[in-house]
Image (cartoon, grey):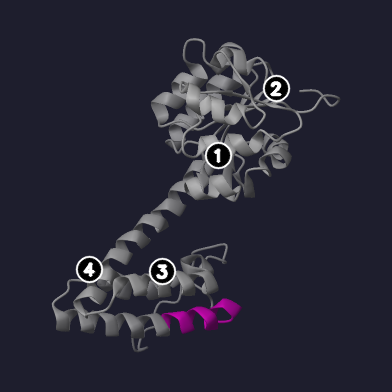
Amino acid sequence: MSESSPIRLGYVGLGNIGGPMAGSLAAWAGGLTVFDLSSDAVAKVVEKGATAAESLADLAASADIIGICVLDDAQVRTVVAGPDGLLSAARPGTVITVHSTIAPETAVELADLCAAREVTLLDAPISGGAMGAASGRLAIMVGGPRDAYEKLKEPFALTADMLVHAGPEVGAGTRMKLARNLLHFISFTATTEAARLAEAAGIDITKLGKVVRHSDAVTGGAGAIMLRDTTAPVERDDPWYGILTGVRTLGEKDLTLALALGEELGVDLPLGQLALRNLATGLGVPHLEGEPA
């Protein structure tokens, strides 16, 4: 890419998430070229202004920044480094962004292969799912050199309202995504546990769901406590100490009450027991010796 010509975009993989992402990127002034094995998926994005590539090599030859959103590590490898893959025709200076959630080691391996061709590969997994892709409200977590990350800001603003530089090493974006999804699916599991308790207590769990969504929209949910830059214990003179001990007190009280209700109703709540046991330490405000738990 040169200073005088606009950045040209490419995109591979036009499924439930890649399709809407590419549809948004089709508005980019420098143009978008797309490739997918599904002609119907390609046609939908072409209707929005994109150009269809005949092959991966054809796409690589015409793009400066290339996004990939395919199923798994094996497909990403094939797209990047397979016969007639992107590396067969990508020019020096090209930036490849992998939006699929793959193993961090795979990202590093492919980045090394790309570097040998003077191509930069960034791992850039997304959060927000199909709904976020359709509304242009994705979060994209990027791992790799800062200068390459900076090149993404303007075009990716079309499809994401949060672009985060997770770290200077390839793989950092994926590690951030895995931590985010750990919280996501543990929360889902905890939701099923709460639903069992509510159901046993005769509560309409669809109404409970409405309350949870409402209060999470107001408070920010679990992310509301993720504002410190460390998980180390909180010093007593730290402004966070009073806030988090308050969270601890309220949480332990409510967890104790919920576990008592579960015992009364014969509902096993293993995550609730684990949360009560680990909440204080996890928040960074463990109970001090002699302090009532």
Q: Position of residue 224 (x, y in %)?
A: 53, 69
Magenta region includes residue 270: no
Give the labeled residue for mark 2. 93
Name the residue carrying label 1. 20
User: Which residue type does callout 3 highlight?
Assistant: Gly
Left or right, 138 with respect to 208, comes to right
Q: Position of residue 83 (x, y in %)?
A: 47, 10
Instruction: Tell me the mark number nearer the camera, choosing from 1 and 2.
Output: 1
Q: CA distance from mark 1 to mark 4?
A: 39 Å
SS class of the residue under badge 2? loop
Q: Residue at x 70, y 22 (%)?
A: 93
Membership of 247 in magenta stretch = yes
Q: What is the C-alpha distance between the residues marked 1 and 2?
A: 26 Å
Residues at circles 3 and 2 in contact by the CB criterion of under 8 Å: no
Above-or-below relation of 91 to 11: above
Residue position for label 4: 270
Dot 1 or dot 2, earlier in sequence: 1
| Crowdedness near tag 4: few (<14), some (14–19) or many (≥20) residues, C-alpha within 10 Å | few
Which label sits on residue 9? Answer: none
Label annotation for residue 282: 3
Asked if residue 121 can be seen in this view, the reply is: no
Front position among marks 4 and 3: 4
Asked whether the beta carbons under mark 1 and mark 2 sit within 8 Å of each other, the answer is: no
Could you give the CA–CA distance between mark 4 and mark 3, rounded to whole angstroms? 17 Å
